[in-house]
């Protein structure tokens, strides 16, 4: 009988989470957490194996641990003996102690702060402020024209501050890899809709005899990371890890407003010269796709290119919150016919702007914003922001 190692945590949300069920109501559910565990397990597997790109080996180990239906009659050597695989259930047992509906309802969504967006204008060409939470959470969040306010599209969301018991049991021989993945989840993981923008940020608090989560960061030079099309490491450059942190904020609403301003600056520094059905991708398309009113003819309307730059909100010991911005670089899939030279140039400008925000206001050049008019438009907002590079 397989010996199992057990871990018990409290998972506590730092920002609202959009975890929907079949009735379009937010609900505590295990599948998003298991998906996130698998995602970070792949990252720690890559680091453990010297950033090997042996997809077959990784998928085999993943399937044996998390379950699969595709490794039928696959014969391989393991621990000195031949093993033939068949479809199997997951060996990772994961449980939440609550499955109730989220407490944050449509009519109680907090008022939304506003941010400047240089491309949102009224018919007279004047800039219109946009809701910061709406910008960061568009999709799960909508603008209610009757109430003239940001609100939820679905019936509810999981509220910041809610918590649940989170327990899992894994085979002892797989426990070290799972523990490393859990530590990465705790530090960088988010769940639910628009989670790359910081929604669904959480902490894992060890319970009972479960030890604290620690792990060495899975770091790799960012240009080397473009040798494959799956996220497997946090990038580095000559200044260290590609991780930035905001100043402390009192609550998630204020911090989400700061993150919206950062994201708007990072994206709109790339000025479009084309509209719908562009004959070729422009620089901004390589950040993420689709882009409203700026499709690429060869990519079509159904292609999806997720942003590999992630936001995560973390809690400080004094109760304040900080935003973490980190990059997990990889090349877009082959169907996008990625231009590595163009992609390297785009991300270099993103890093330059983030580093610019680490300097004293008034001493910044904003050289990464090559369009002079756009630079002038963004500068007043960017001057109010302050980041720092995370060195660990």
Image (tube, rainbow, N blue to C red):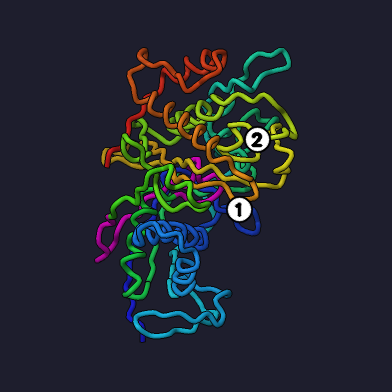
**Number of disc labels:** 2
Reading the chain from its start, which is encountered first: label 1 or label 2?
Answer: 1
> Could you tell me residue 234's position as x and y percent?
39, 46
Label 1: element kind? loop
- Quadrant (top left, top right, bottom left, bottom right) of the C terminus: top left
The residue lying toward the viewer, choosing from 72 and 99, is: 72
User: Is residue 72 left or right of 80 when viewed as pictured?
Assistant: right
Point 44% across, 53% down: residue: 232
The residue lying toward the viewer, choosing from 189 and 352, is: 352
Q: Residues within 10 Å of mark 1 (few under 14, many from 20)?
A: some
Q: CA distance from mark 1 to mark 2?
A: 37 Å
Find out whether residue 306 is within the magenta segment.
Answer: no
> Could you tell me residue 44's position as x and y percent?
37, 58
- Mark identifier at residue 187: none
- Quadrant (top left, top right, bottom left, bottom right) of the N terminus: bottom left
> Could you tell me residue 6's position as x and y percent?
33, 71
User: Is residue 373 left or right of 237 when viewed as pictured?
Assistant: right
Assign the magenta stretch its main secondary structure: loop
Q: Eyeballing the image, is 354 above or below 197? A: above
Camera sees residue 106:
no
Label 2: element kind? loop
Find out whether residue 200 is within the magenta segment.
Answer: yes
The residue lying toward the viewer, choosing from 311 and 321, is: 311
Please give the residue where the numbered disc 2 appears in the rendered image. Answer: 281
Asked where in the image residue 319 lies, by quadrant, the reply is top left
Please give the residue where the numbered disc 1 appears in the rendered image. Answer: 25
Q: Residues within 10 Å of mark 2 (few under 14, many from 20)?
A: many
The residue lying toward the viewer, choosing from 87 and 32, is: 87
Camera sees residue 101:
yes
| Residue range corresponding to the magenta coloring | 190-214
């Amino acid at each position: 009988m397989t010996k199992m190692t057990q871990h018990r945590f409290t998972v506590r949300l730092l920002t609202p989470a959009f975890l929907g069920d079949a009735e379009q109501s937010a609900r505590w559910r295990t599948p998003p957490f298991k998906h996130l565990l698998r995602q970070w397990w792949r990252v720690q597997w890559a680091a453990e194996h010297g950033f090997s790109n042996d997809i077959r080996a990784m998928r085999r180990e993943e399937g044996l641990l998390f379950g699969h239906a595709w490794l039928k009659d696959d014969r391989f050597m393991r621990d000195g003996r031949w093993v033939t695989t068949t479809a199997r259930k997951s060996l990772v047992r994961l449980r939440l102690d609550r499955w109730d509906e989220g407490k944050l309802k449509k009519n109680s969504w907090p008022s939304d702060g506003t941010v400047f967006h240089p491309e949102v204008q009224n018919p007279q060409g004047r800039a219109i402020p946009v809701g910061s939470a709406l910008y960061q959470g568009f999709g799960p969040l909508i603008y209610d024209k009757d109430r003239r306010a940001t609100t939820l599209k679905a019936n509810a969301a999981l509220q910041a501050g809610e918590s649940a018991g989170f327990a899992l049991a894994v085979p002892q021989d797989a426990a070290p890899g799972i523990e490393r993945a859990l530590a990465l989840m705790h530090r960088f993981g988010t769940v639910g809709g628009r989670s790359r923008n910081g929604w669904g940020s959480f902490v894992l608090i060890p319970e009972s005899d479960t030890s604290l989560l620690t792990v060495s960061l899975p770091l790799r030079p960012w240009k080397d990371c473009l040798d494959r099309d799956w996220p497997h490491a946090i990038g580095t450059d000559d200044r260290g890890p590609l991780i930035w942190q905001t100043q402390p904020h009192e609550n998630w609403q204020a911090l989400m407003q700061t993150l919206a301003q950062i994201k708007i600056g990072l994206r709109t520094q790339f000025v479009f010269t084309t509209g719908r059905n562009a004959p070729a991708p422009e620089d901004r398309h390589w950040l993420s796709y689709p882009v409203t009113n700026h499709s690429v003819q060869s990519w079509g309307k159904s292609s999806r290119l997720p942003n590999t730059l992630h936001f995560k909100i973390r809690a400080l010991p004094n109760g304040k919150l900080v935003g973490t911005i980190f990059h997990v670089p990889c090349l877009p899939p082959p169907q996008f016919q990625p231009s590595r030279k163009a992609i390297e140039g785009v991300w270099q400008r993103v890093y330059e702007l983030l580093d610019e925000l680490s300097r004293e206001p008034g001493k910044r050049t904003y050289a990464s914003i090559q369009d002079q008019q756009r630079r002038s438009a963004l500068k007043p907002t960017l001057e109010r922001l302050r980041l720092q590079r995370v060195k660990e």
